[in-house]
Image: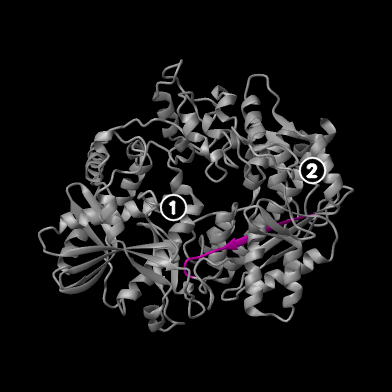
């Protein structure tokens, strides 16, 4: 059984670097922790587990036979097992445990050779030769800060725990090397991940289709000696905000964090822009009513962020009760397009609310003119966000004339809405691929005609295991789009970036229609040749996210331009859309709005807060779960309702042991989700039409 000591571990240490207040909320059952339900974090964790398993084969010929992993979660047992293994002169230990004072770490890999110890932190993060861990200001590079402090914390604990053993401890990173390729197909599938009641996941290593020597000899994981960088970090002030000056030194900070966590002491940090990404906040209750599976409210837990903001002494108002959902906070201010430089200035003013932000705080001193821009400047958009938050302000602003000008002069019906689903994994699925290369496995294609007719025209999904999909994906997409005239729309830059990456695949694989495929890609994409110049295809896809940023701002989106936020906003601003998509006779196969995956479907339902993504069916029905069990491999998520879950579903399709029921269920869920993504773009364009008519 796992013990319940309040040790400061490396994960809790990293939380304290983000904000010392988080040490009170973490592992506190009274408070919401969104990390627990974050499918994207699940995806990252799974990539990390697989890289961790492959790493063992770099240092040990047969990690399973030699039993190098300390699998217990009981801290005392892990410490005892580690001590016994370290009695050997030469040994490899996975998940070695060390305790110093109240500091406890588990080391990914420890390699002891006589009196030399390699302390190896395995990360699924990618590495290439140009990476700089310490920047020109002799501080940890911002992209590497959490990883560097993680390794520094482990090094500090292990050196103190073994200080009487006359051992030399050297810290290393082991990272995914983007300069190397995998030597065989199916390397990723060797390490199959299943759900575990104890710790969330278990790894099953399947060597039936691969020689173990391939695992021993693969070069996609690179070992990097981090001695200089870690020594520098251990001897410099901590690079983090809200740390009392007397705790700035690494050792002092570690000891302070250890004490406040052990004693469950609450430290109040200054609230500000950093709170925007706080995981200890309750999800927005206004966006839904009840959990459709349990029938209970989605969250009855306390909101840590609300408590922090309510405890602060604000200028002019002192301490006041603040609800992060009912009150519009300054963290909502859109920071895109150079706005990222503003949080520090705004945080200097102790004002909690968006309405308190003064326009002169955000007025640019030299906003450069953009002759090609048609629509709001970044400053104008931020100004609208503040002004529309004032009492009796309208709910949205829409630049009708400017929108119509670009629509009439540059767009041609029918409108084609496309959306891609892709994955990038540290250990590639296919021979010859580098870590984190793009795999494009799915697209959806909706058409909006000038007369208002809507059809889900086409879709494509690669759901077979061990099939490299990129060239087939391109051929299917080219066939789908080349048969029609009209403007092609995407949402954000993802589709453009993916196609430019797949262009390299076409060059490498040299298919028979190589020239045609490259011409197709060049025609519908743009590529930057310099920061100020780009080559634009004749039929280059239009970015609907940029259309939103230029012509439409809704206070209901709370500063976000994500389609998951913009869609509910425009539904609120255009009640005609709610009426239309609440009609049970509207959408489905052989209905007014045609579908390839739904016989009939109501997208907007008050029971689900009129959020179409919450109406997507679960992967497995209750009948299937009762009859066959939840999943053949221990499924850990219930629905495909966002891009991260789609990535996880595709990853599961690559596991060769997934049975037919599971394969069919995941396939259907992926198709339904991607269909909604392009339908959401149609709804958005329809919303602009209503806004034009109602203006």
Dividing the picture into quadrants, the one containing residue 508 is bottom right
Is residue 283 left or right of 441 when viewed as pictured? left
Q: Position of residue 464 (x, y in %)?
A: 61, 73
Q: Please state which of residues 404 and 582 is positioned toward the viewer in this rendering.
A: 404
Distance, label 2 to label 1, CA atoms, is 40 Å
On the rendered image, what quadrant is the C terminus found in?
A: top right
Dividing the picture into quadrants, the one containing residue 581 is top right
Please rate how many residues cluster around mark 2, counting C-alpha atoms within 10 Å: few if below 14, some from 14 to 19, many from 20: some
Q: Secondary structure at mark 1?
A: helix
Label 2–label 1 contact, CB within 8 A: no
Q: Is residue 653 magenta?
A: no
Q: Is residue 1 visible?
A: no
Q: Secondary structure at mark 2?
A: helix
Label for residue 72? none
Q: Residue at x 52, y 43 (%)?
A: 294
Relative to 366, residue 148 above or below: below
Which mark is first along the chain, 1 or 2?
1
Dividing the picture into quadrants, the one containing residue 392 is top right
On the rendered image, what quadrant is the N terminus found in?
A: bottom left
Q: Residue at x 85, y 34 (%)?
A: 693
Q: Disc 2 marks which residue? A: 686
Q: Residue furthest top?
A: 316
Please rate how many residues cluster around mark 1, counting C-alpha atoms within 10 Å: few if below 14, some from 14 to 19, many from 20: few
Q: Which residues are magenta?
A: 416-427
Q: Position of residue 536 (x, y in %)?
A: 74, 58
Label for residue 143? 1
């Amino acid at each position: 059984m796992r013990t319940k000591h309040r040790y400061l571990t490396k994960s809790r240490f990293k939380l304290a670097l983000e904000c010392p207040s988080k040490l009170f909320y973490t592992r506190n059952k009274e408070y919401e922790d969104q990390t627990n339900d974050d499918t994207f974090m699940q995806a990252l964790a799974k990539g990390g587990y697989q890289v961790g398993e492959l790493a063992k084969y770099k240092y040990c010929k047969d990690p399973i036979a030699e039993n190098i992993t300390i699998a217990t979660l009981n801290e005392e047992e892990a410490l005892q097992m580690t001590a016994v293994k370290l009695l050997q002169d030469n040994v490899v230990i996975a998940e070695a445990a060390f305790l110093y004072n109240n500091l406890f770490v588990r080391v990914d890999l420890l390699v002891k050779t006589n009196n030399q110890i390699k302390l190896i932190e395995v990360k699924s993060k990618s590495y290439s030769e140009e990476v700089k861990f310490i920047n020109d200001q002799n501080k940890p590079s911002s992209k590497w800060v959490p990883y560097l402090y993680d390794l520094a914390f482990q090094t500090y604990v292990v050196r103190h725990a073994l200080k009487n053993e006359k051992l030399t401890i050297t810290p290393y990173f082991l990272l995914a090397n983007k300069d190397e390729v995998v030597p065989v197909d199916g390397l990723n599938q060797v390490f199959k991940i299943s759900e575990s009641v104890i710790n969330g996941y278990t790894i099953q290593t399947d060597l039936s289709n691969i020689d173990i020597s391939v695992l021993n000899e693969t070069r996609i994981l690179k070992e990097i000696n981090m001695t200089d960088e870690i020594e520098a970090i251990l001897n410099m002030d901590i690079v983090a905000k809200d740390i009392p000056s007397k705790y700035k030194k690494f050792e002092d900070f570690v000891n302070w964090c250890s004490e406040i966590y052990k004693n469950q002491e609450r430290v109040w940090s200054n609230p500000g822009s950093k709170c925007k990404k706080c995981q200890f906040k309750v999800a927005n209750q206004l966006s839904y009513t009840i959990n459709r599976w349990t029938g209970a409210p989605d969250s009855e837990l306390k909101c840590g962020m609300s408590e922090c903001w309510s405890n602060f002494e604000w200028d002019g108002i002192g301490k006041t009760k603040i609800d992060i959902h009912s009150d519009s906070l300054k963290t909502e201010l859109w920071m895109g397009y150079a706005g990222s430089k503003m949080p520090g200035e705004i945080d200097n003013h102790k004002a909690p609310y968006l309405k308190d932000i003064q326009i002169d705080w955000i007025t640019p001193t030299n906003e450069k003119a953009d002759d090609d821009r048609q629509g709001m400047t970044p400053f104008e958009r931020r100004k609208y966000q503040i002004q529309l938050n004032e009492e009796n302000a309208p709910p949205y602003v829409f630049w009708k004339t400017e929108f119509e000008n670009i629509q009439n002069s540059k767009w041609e019906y029918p409108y084609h809405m496309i959306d891609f689903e892709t994955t990038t994994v540290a250990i590639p699925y296919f021979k010859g691929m580098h870590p984190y290369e793009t795999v494009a496995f799915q697209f959806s294609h909706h058409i909006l005609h000038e007369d208002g007719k809507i059809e889900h025209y086409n879709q494509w999904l690669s759901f077979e295991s061990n099939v490299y999909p990129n060239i087939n994906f391109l051929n299917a997409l080219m066939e789908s789009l080349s048969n029609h005239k009209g403007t092609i729309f995407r949402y954000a830059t993802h589709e453009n970036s993916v196609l430019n990456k797949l262009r390299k695949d076409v060059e490498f694989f040299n298919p028979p229609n190589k020239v045609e495929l490259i011409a197709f890609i060049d025609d519908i994409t743009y590529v930057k040749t310099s920061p100020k110049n780009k080559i634009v295809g004749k039929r280059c896809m239009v970015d609907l996210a940029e259309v939103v940023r230029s012509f439409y701002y809704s206070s209901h989106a709370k500063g976000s331009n994500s389609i998951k936020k913009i869609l509910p906003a425009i539904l609120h601003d255009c009640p005609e859309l709610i009426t239309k998509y609440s009609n049970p006779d509207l959408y489905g196969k052989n209905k007014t709005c045609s579908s390839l995956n739904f016989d009939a479907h109501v997208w907007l339902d008050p029971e689900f807060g009129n959020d179409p993504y919450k109406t997507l069916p679960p992967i497995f029905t209750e009948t299937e779960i009762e009859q066959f069990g939840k999943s053949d491999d221990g499924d850990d998520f219930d629905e495909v309702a966002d891009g991260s879950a789609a990535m996880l579903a595709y990853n599961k399709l690559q596991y060769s042991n997934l049975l037919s029921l599971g394969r069919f269920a995941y396939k259907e869920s992926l198709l339904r989700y991607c269909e909604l993504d392009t339908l959401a773009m149609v709804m958005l364009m329809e919303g602009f039409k209503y806004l034009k008519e109602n203006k």
